[in-house]
Amino acid sequence: MLELSHVCKTFNAGTINEKKALCDLDLHLEPGDFVTVIGGNGAGKSTMLNAAAGVWPVDSGCITIDGTDVTGLPEYKRAKYIGRVFQDPMMGTVPNMQIVENLALAARRGRPRTLKWGVTRSEKEIYHEKLKTLGLGLEDRMTSKVGLLSGGQRQALTLLMASLQKPKLLLLDEHTAALDPATAAKVLELSDSIVQENGLTAMMITHNMRDAIVHGNRLIMMNAGKIILDIRGEEKKHLTKHELLDKFAEIAGVQEETDQVLLS
């Protein structure tokens, strides 16, 4: 469903601020994979997601989504393939538009715009049922402006919007980092259910090692723009934080005392 082949990206090349963010990166995701991504600051996690999303062009390499080479496509042309939820709850929605209007925009992602009526009655009924599955009471507030919602409610809504068109690839970029623990747990629970119910292929960046181990069927760790660890299946199910730290220390050649230091 996603293949990154020999992808390289360097920022500020040839200057004193040169930073090699991705170094000959290879990654292959099968349909239905839910991959959690961890690593320290500057490891290349967000750069990898941005490369897949087409935020900027890569220096070299090839990016393929569901058999289609999208390497040269800009971000807006990849919209029909990708759903994304950002770390900032204020991104991904239009705050001065109603909940139902935001859902209608998401439902039309990647499709030609027409002069037909904005939101039909049948669409409202569909959105009402979809919102009910979130368990947040938003189905009774469909005409409320999104800007009035809490951060957790907005992230839950953004998750729903990102999955309405059943994208080829769902990118979750530290989407619970700005939430309190209880709300973050609820959003992660919703993430799991949405991915499973829709059979989506997903990548989730997180700084929480427990979340990285508990969620998804595969875990990758990045360091210096490369994937240094790829754990899946039964090995991932029985993995502990201590074992994960030991693996990182062994492969990366450094010893980190705690996950707080590793993923600060």
Image: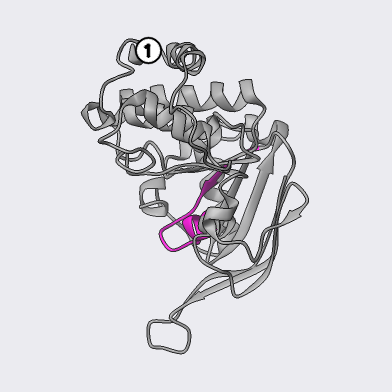
Residue displayed at 47% across by 56% down? 46
Residue 129 sits above or below residue 66 on the image: above
Residue 99 sits above or below residue 96 on the image: above
Residue 8 sits above or below residue 201 on the image: below
Q: Residues within 10 Å of mark 1 (few under 14, many from 20)?
A: many
Q: Quadrant of residue 163?
A: top right
Q: Quadrant of residue 95?
A: top left
Q: Indicate left or right for 21 with 96 as reference.
A: right
Q: Is residue 249 visible?
A: no
Residue displayed at 43% across by 63% down? 42
Is residue 109 or residue 191 the one in the foreground? 109
Residue displayed at 40% across by 59% down? 41
The extreme left residue here reads: 148
Percent across and percent down for residue 240 are 55, 35
Does the magenta portion include 96? no
Percent across and percent down for residue 108 are 53, 35
Percent across and percent down for residue 156 are 40, 27
Q: Quadrant of the N terminus?
A: top right
Does the magenta portion include 45? yes
Disc 1 secondary structure class: helix
Q: Is residue 4 visible?
A: yes
Residue displayed at 50% across by 55% down? 45
Residue 95 sits above or below residue 19 on the image: above
Where is mark 1, residue-wise?
A: 139
Give, as a three-letter code, the residue at label 1. Answer: Glu
Question: Magenta region: which residues?
Answer: 34-49
Q: Indicate left or right for 193 with 63 as reference.
A: left
